[in-house]
Amino acid sequence: METIVKTLEREFHISEGYLKNLITLFDDGATIPFIARYRKESHGSLNEQVIIMIYERLNYLRAYNTRKIEIIRLITDAGKMSDEIMTLLETATTLRELEDVYRPYRPKKETRVSIAIAQGLLPLAKKILAQKDSGGDLDEIAKTFLNVNSIDSKKQVLSGAAALKGASDIIAEMINDNAVLRKMLREKILKTGFVETQLRKADTSQFITYDNFKEPVKKIPPHRVLAINRGEKEALLRMKITMNEEDALSLIAKRIITGASIYQVFLKKTIKDSYLRLMLPSLEREFWSDLFLNATEQAIKVFGDNLRHLLMQPPLKDQTILGFDPGFKAGCKLAVVDSRNNVLATGVIYPHLPQKEEAKSAETLVSLIKKYHVNVIALGNGTATKESEIFISKVIKDNDLKVMYALTNEAGASIYSASKLAGEELPQYDLTLRSAISIARRLLDPLSELIKIAPKHLGVGQYQHDMPEARLKTVLDRVVTSVVSAIGVNVNTASKELLGYVSGINVAVAAKIVLYREKNGSFHSLEQLLKVPKLGSKTYHQAAGFLRIVNGLNPFDNTAIHPESYDVAAKLLQLLKLRLDEMHLFPDLTEIKIQELARELQIGIPTLKDIINELRKPGRDLRDEISPPVLRRELLNIKDLTVGLILDGIVSNVLDFGAFVDIGIHQDGLVHISEIANHFIKHPSEVLKIGDKVMIKIISLDVNAKRIGLTIKNV
């Protein structure tokens, strides 16, 4: 049997030594961001995504081995183990194949088959399967297995027809439980099967595409699987997986029917019964489950990629932001937030119907902008956004204001506003005003604000509410931790929510850090964290490299250099005759010089290069290298658009079938995957990510349906 390490080596083409190092680090409790950043020599500088794939595959293989051992024990204890069964178990490569082997021996509830076996008809079934009688009467043979004298009526077999019916049920289940046959049929469905759907209701326009729909199983893309699943879930679609019935029956018959006998016709009928009644429904469920699982994994991956880019959006530093939460009857909620996240003022205006207090609302807005020197208005992209954008644009123009505005994703703001966390942070404000505050803070520092909201509510995925909750949370929490770790967290200003996503730190420890900070004042060195209750040396070791202290006692504390490497960093500066306050003057070094320094400092080259990069840019924020949000002063109306018009846009969402682009109106346009690149791409994320600035051309326009088709090819 191939060991887990050998399997991983074969699948990932990574050396056995590196894999063993990774497994040791996983088992010791090291986090993936820590391993990826600070243990590069142990795994050959693998990127974080590959390490995650190895980690998940390792867990699967361990679960597989555990289950195999358990199945071997169960079959052995039942006295059913044989060389043939052991061979099937040893050659099984997936958990599903293991379960197929165990299927005939799994305890079952009372069924037609269990009743037939209790009636003593198993020997008849075996006799029929043996197919050794070339002549004779099948009914007469069956009558030799009658049981007419049993006290228990369930055990009575009163006729040859009843005996044959019971034997047929037993054989049908044997066929259904045959691991080899199930594997062969599974492969057949994968090669030649189809997904077919029909509408349950004739007037369901949402799923009209899937009426009398048919697509090969091997070709159906993940987003269509998710759409069909949603239609089935809402009882609007009927789905089935099909393949050629004759081909399937022929495949089964070749393994069951050994030649001419008096049982041939009987076995053909039993095979058809087994296939239609048992095997096909069972395999259909399995296949759809697999298709949905693969589709959800793809959707979660896309969601994770989108979330990463959303969280990496650069903050608008040193700005005063006015959050504008649009609405009609309930009014538009306003909140002014300064560069330190402090709320300076709040209010409500009613510029739209039914109140239509446009002049009064404009006066209030102008007053707030001037009084608090507002630089940017963060306009939420919800109900009444278009009307509010028209209003804001007019106010800016009529009053010659220098302020700009930016459309801001308000997804999840209302959920946050009603949350316990919002109540703790903003107890003095009404729920509706909390939304405006959140919208302003999202522009001021997207990461710090967006982590307060469950990722599935952020509106950057597809069918996220259909995803398996536990899996979605695991993957998205991992993404947030990765982003937080990549950027670094100021331990003296970060909220407990932000600290809770730092590698190695959980929610309880994060709360302890904030409490310690409130009681004792700011931290002056990372080592002070060891004084925080519940924060032990192991947690400190995992987290320290991702935490920052600005203007602390040790300048290295404001870099991503791990404390375990401070001595090396200090010695490196000494070798280059630089003081700590001259880190930014670090010279360019040749590859040969770096190798020489690595030998002298007795440190790996990857770690040395990371140290050098941090010394050159102490306190850097990776988000500063990303284009800032698009700020506007004037509104573009959909009626101003024409086919062929070229505009600047910013990518707002990336999905399997294309990307949505904000072009400065309330409705985003769609760039279909076929309009993204001149060369073939498997997925839009190969070219685009959330926040990318792109030049687009309008290729189709439906004003009434508010559909805008875009291209970025040859623009």
Image: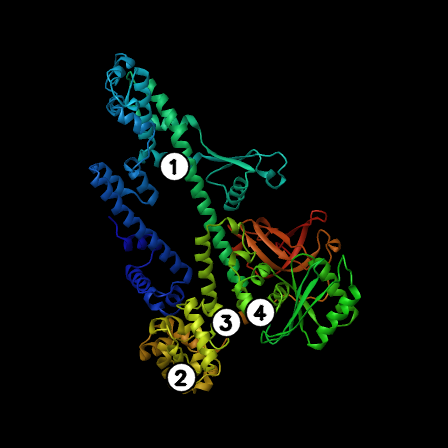
Q: Residue at x 78, y 63 (%)?
A: 357
Q: Give the residue at mark 1.
A: 186
Q: Quadrant of the C terminus?
A: bottom right
Amino acid type, mark 3: Ser
* Residue 38 point in image, percent of width and height: 37, 70
Tell me, yes or no, whether the two marked residues, 3 and 1, touch with CB atoms within 8 Å.
no
- Secondary structure under tag 4 reads loop
Tell me, yes or no, whether the two marked residues, 1 and 2, touch with CB atoms within 8 Å.
no
Q: Give the residue at mark 4.
A: 426
147 shown above or below 394 = above
Closer to the N terminus: mark 3 or mark 4?
4
Bin the neighbour count of mark 4 within 10 Å (Cα to Cα): few under 14, some 14-19, many 20 and up.
some
Q: Nearer the viewer, mark 1 or mark 2?
A: 1
Quarter of image, res 177: top left
Q: Nearer the viewer, mark 1 or mark 4?
A: 4
Q: Give the residue at mark 3.
A: 495
Q: Name the foreground residue: 335 vs 542.
A: 335
Closer to the N terminus: mark 3 or mark 1?
1
Q: Residue at x 47, y 49 (%)?
A: 296
* Residue 27 point in image, percent of width and height: 30, 62
Amino acid type, mark 4: Leu
Let me know if residue 691 appears in the view: no
Q: Give the residue at mark 2.
A: 573
The residues bearing labels 1 and 4 have C-alpha atoms spaced at a distance of: 56 Å
* Residue 672 point in image, percent of width and height: 59, 49
Q: Is residue 267 left or right of residue 557?
A: left
Q: Residue at x 32, y 64 (%)?
A: 25
The residues bearing labels 3 and 2 have C-alpha atoms spaced at a distance of: 34 Å
Quarter of image, res 325: bottom right
